[in-house]
Image: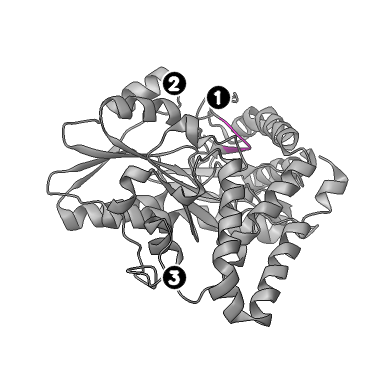
Amino acid sequence: MNAELKKQFLIHEDIAFLNFDSFGACPKPIFEDYQKWQLELEQEPAQFIQVNGPTYLKQSREALAKYINCADANDLVYVTNPSYATNIIAKSLKLNPGDEILTTNLEYGVADKAWEYYCKKAGAKYVRQNITLPITTKEKFIEEFFAGLSPKTKLIFISEITSTTALKFPAKEICEMAKQKGIITFVDGAHTVGHIPLDLSQLKADIYTGACHKWMLTPKGSSFLYVKKEFQKLFDPLLVSWGYDAMFPTDSQFQDYHQMQGTRDFSAFLTIPKAIEFMNQNNWLEVAKESREMVQKNALRFCNLVGSKPLCPITDEWLGQMFSIPISTPEPEKLQRHLFVKYKIEIPVMRHGDKTYLRYSINAFNSQNDLDRLYDALKEIIETTDLITKK
């Protein structure tokens, strides 16, 4: 990777940071932009929140809408994270006893919890359709997924890129088939924006949430929710505030209800134009390409080391800038902490059902040396401890 580009990040130099996908990492120019907005907020809070804030948010939404090809910026509202967005949808969706939400068995744990909670309250069912691993073809994936469809299916919820397994799902094809069947689609794109190209006009999801504070490089707590116009009035805000029955309503009830939330620091949302500018200036498509190549070049090497097999073909069709290694360990949390404390390697070791995955992610500041450090550390752990059981 470009050494000069690495200097743009604030990550400690002694850390092999292989956990970009969990929380991202904010480059210095974007972080400085963040602090500029926060300073303006503190210098004149009333003007910032009440007078200038709506214009600032509108400008940021318009930049984001252009970046993800969303025709109307008013169809986007900012939220702190995709879990917040999922709760907006799950809480307001009018579920009746017997209704079903169709998803996979590989979704993000917090999203599962939100849907299970609200489905249980309504007497509905959250159908976690089993996807066979390793994945072989897109056609088989789609066939397996839609085997969970029933006349009671009210909404399809699916990740575009999964968290624990780091797999790219055929979300576009699933949205197309769901539309033919008249079923609402909700795509979780928490790991998509800034990672792989996103074009909402082509994806045609009815509902979409994405995190800008991961691969898009913005400060933490910066995400968005998109809802197609015809469905916007179905979803109430989690917090009813000044936007309800507003004294001075805008031409978008969706914006009024969800963005006018009283006192809060929305500076992180305002850094999105600077993040887009930073990526454009640094040829981010090429950075992503080099990162994917490094991810794929090392994938089989790690699987062979721990005695496991990859979860999918090692191709761009299924993988982006991260890879999950199936690993056998009696104490995932202890292994994760051991890698950080002894080897200064920041990497998640995640449970998913009865399986465990060690996931590395690669971005501009990473080099082959980071993955070599990980390889050597895992080799030593296998040889000297019982934290990894080679299959």
For the point 54% across and 34% down, which residue is it?
Answer: 199
Spatial CA span between label 1 and label 3: 40 Å
For the point 68% across and 42% down, which residue is it?
Answer: 362
Spatial CA span between label 3 and label 2: 42 Å
Query: Identity of the amino acid at label 1?
Result: Glu
Q: Secondary structure at mark 2?
A: helix
Query: Identity of the amino acid at label 2?
Result: Lys
Q: Secondary structure at mark 1?
A: loop
Q: Nearer the viewer, residue 260 or 174?
A: 260
Q: Earlier in the sequence, mark 3 or mark 2?
A: 2
Q: Position of residue 215 (x, y in %)?
A: 62, 47
By secondary structure, the bulk of the magenta-drawn segment is best described as loop
* Cβ atoms under marks 1 and 2 closer than 8 Å: yes
Residue labelled with disc 2: 138
Q: Secondary structure at mark 3?
A: loop
Query: Identity of the amino acid at label 3?
Result: Gln
Q: Nearer the viewer, residue 278 or 252?
A: 252
Q: Which residues are magenta?
A: 319-323
